[in-house]
Image (cartoon, grey):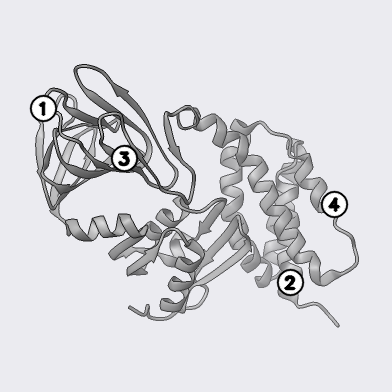
Amino acid sequence: MNRPRTDIAAEQAARWIVRLSADDPAEREQARSGFAAWKAADPRHANAAAGMENLLRQLHAVREPAGGDHRPARAALAAIAPDRPRQRLRQLAAASAVAVLALTGALVISERPAYLLADLRSPTGQWHTHTLADGSRLTLGSDSAVNVHFNAGERHVELVRGDILVDVAKDAQRPFIVDSGQAAIRALGTRFSVRRDGAATTLSMLESKVSAQVPRHPAIVVQVGQRTRITDDGVGPITAIDAAGVQDAWRAHQLVVDDQPLAEVLDELARHRPGQLHYDHAQIAGIRVAAVLPLDDTDKALQLLIDNFPQLRIRMLTRYLVMVDAPSSGTAKK
């Protein structure tokens, strides 16, 4: 039986990934020229290459910092036997995922020494709760890390990465301070969550109040049921939240979104699963989501998105390489 042309195109696109990651610059340049001609030769080639090109852009970004040996990834493809053609596509996809992980692994380690050396950590997809020396409780969200520094004058928690839920034990002699990099968040007896996301900190107040201090800016008091986004420019606008709902979402490991861009939802899901989750910004730009998604079962969360947005296509090439696009048009189902 003849193989479907789409399978052949996907297999060829996977092979181009390997050629485009060659060690020899001249070989890479020749591959780029050939890849462009291959895509132009057939619309099916361009379609098969669309998702792969997004992957290649990220591989190019990590190529120099990683400094790894790419030959094992190419050897994995070369070792695929020429027989059993129905299995070759799956093997090629798996080998491409191996290439992604091999190229990015060294970069992840080099970019996250602070995470690896932190006092308390929670791996991707796990939530850990710790009782500190003063009786305060600290819950680390998925892929999060903190350093803890207690002394006779203060209790200091440095949020290195990710997000935390803090339930502060009262101690009138020692203020409790969370340092997120952008702000020092000071409390005596309260419950709140803090998320560090790049150059911004999100503070959500669940009980009582805190004072948020950004260097060279006046301190701002944030009350229960309020949320703010903090940057180096200061404390942003205060918005209202359902404090009980936020606490319930923490306990149930849920992502609650209300009219949020799909890209932001996928970014959040990516934080809670191993490997890579790739998507085409342009194709999903008009899709907004209102949903409650399980963060401790991201496969189920992705399936819920498919069920509610039939124009979406989610391809799990392996457990560690997922691609999302919207090849068909249509109206989003709310």
Q: Earlier in the sequence, mark 3 or mark 4?
A: 4
User: Which residue in the structure is indicated by mark 2?
Assistant: 7
Question: Which residue: 38% across, 47% down?
Answer: 141
Q: Residue 303 in the image: x percent, y percent?
A: 49, 72
Specify the label residue 78 is tagged with: 4
Label located before the other in sequence (3 or 1): 3
- Describe the element under mark 4 as helix, strand or loop: helix
Q: Based on the displayed image, in which of its 4 quarters is residue 4 positioned?
A: bottom right
Q: Amino acid at mark 3?
A: Leu
- Which numbered disc, 2 or 1, marks the residue closer to the eye? 1
Q: Earlier in the sequence, mark 3 or mark 2?
A: 2
Q: Tell me which numbered mark, 4 or 1, is placed earlier along the sequence.
A: 4
Tag in front: 3 or 4: 3
Give the left or right position of residue 234, taking residue 293 as reference. left
Element on which disc 3 rests: strand
Real-space CA distance between mark 4 and mark 2, rounded to the nearest whole angstrom: 18 Å
Q: Residue at x 46, y 49 (%)?
A: 126
First-in-chain label (2 vs 1): 2
Disc 3 marks which residue?
A: 138
Look at mark 1 in the image and give the residue it sits on: 172
Q: Are marks 4 and 2 in contact (CB under 8 Å)?
A: no
